[in-house]
Image (cartoon, helix red, strand yellow):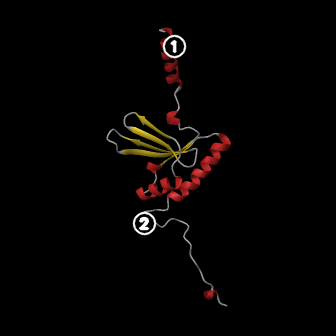
Amino acid sequence: MSIDAIPIHVINPLPTEPGLTGNALPLLREISEMLRRLLETGESTAIDLSALPLTPIDLEWLREKLGEGEIAVTLQASGESTLNETACPGVWWITHRNENGAVTSQFIEVSFVPELVKAHPEDVKIGRDHLELLISDL
């Protein structure tokens, strides 16, 4: 039997939808590695999606693959920011919008709790002072 008689089948492991660049699939692998680091060391990390060569179709594909989780946080500060847990706990899709509602940046953050929602120690001190004042007036 000659080598020409051996059937060859090409299987493309990358998504082939129109508009996909192939850049989203490696991100899933990177996110998996980030989760491993989070579990082993507690280290939070983020990917700036706005800085990557991703098409809107890539972002839609990535969002679909990551799915929706149980937690959503909305912040109002110079525009709206949404922090959505994906179906993979510890993986957060964060979107920042300006005052007009246009997306200004998007991130994938891998953390137990997104940094943006953690209270700053100075803010906690202000809250404690406020509560103590409230209690003293009772």
Find residue 115 and name its label: none
Label located before the other in sequence (1 or 2): 2
Q: Residues within 10 Å of mark 1 (few under 14, many from 20)?
A: few
- What's the distance in space between the residues labelled 1 and 2, CA to CA? 60 Å
Nearest the viewer among 133 and 58 is 133
Instruction: Using the rendered image of the protein, determine whether residue 38 is visible from the camera's viewpoint.
Output: yes
Q: Amino acid at mark 1?
A: Glu
Q: Amino acid at mark 2?
A: Pro
Residue 123, placed above or below residue 24: above
**Residue 98 position within the rendered picture, expressed as x and y whole percent measured from the top left:** 35, 40
Find residue 132 and name its label: 1
Q: Which mark's residue is nearer the viewer, 1 or 2? A: 1
Residue 52, placed above or below residue 112: below
Secondary structure beneath dot 1 equals helix
Nearest the viewer among 9 and 83 is 83
Q: Is residue 5 left or right of residue 74?
A: right
Nearest the viewer among 87 and 76 is 87
Dividing the picture into quadrants, the one containing residue 41 is top right
Q: Residues within 10 Å of mark 2 (few under 14, many from 20)?
A: few
Instruction: Using the rendered image of the protein, determine whether residue 53 is visible from the camera's viewpoint.
Output: no
Give the farthest residue toward the left: 100
Secondary structure beneath dot 2 equals loop
**Residue 106 position within the rendered picture, expressed as x and y whole percent measured from the top left:** 45, 46
Q: Quadrant of the N terminus?
A: bottom right
Find residue 18 and name its label: 2
Dividing the picture into quadrants, the one containing residue 10 is bottom right
Q: Residue at x 60, y 52 (%)?
A: 32
Q: Residue at x 64, y 39 (%)?
A: 42
**Residue 74 position within the rendered picture, expressed as x and y whole percent measured from the top left:** 44, 37
Residue 43, placed above or below residue 127: below
Q: Residue at x 42, y 39 (%)?
A: 81
**Residue 26 position within the rendered picture, expressed as x and y whole percent measured from the top left:** 55, 57
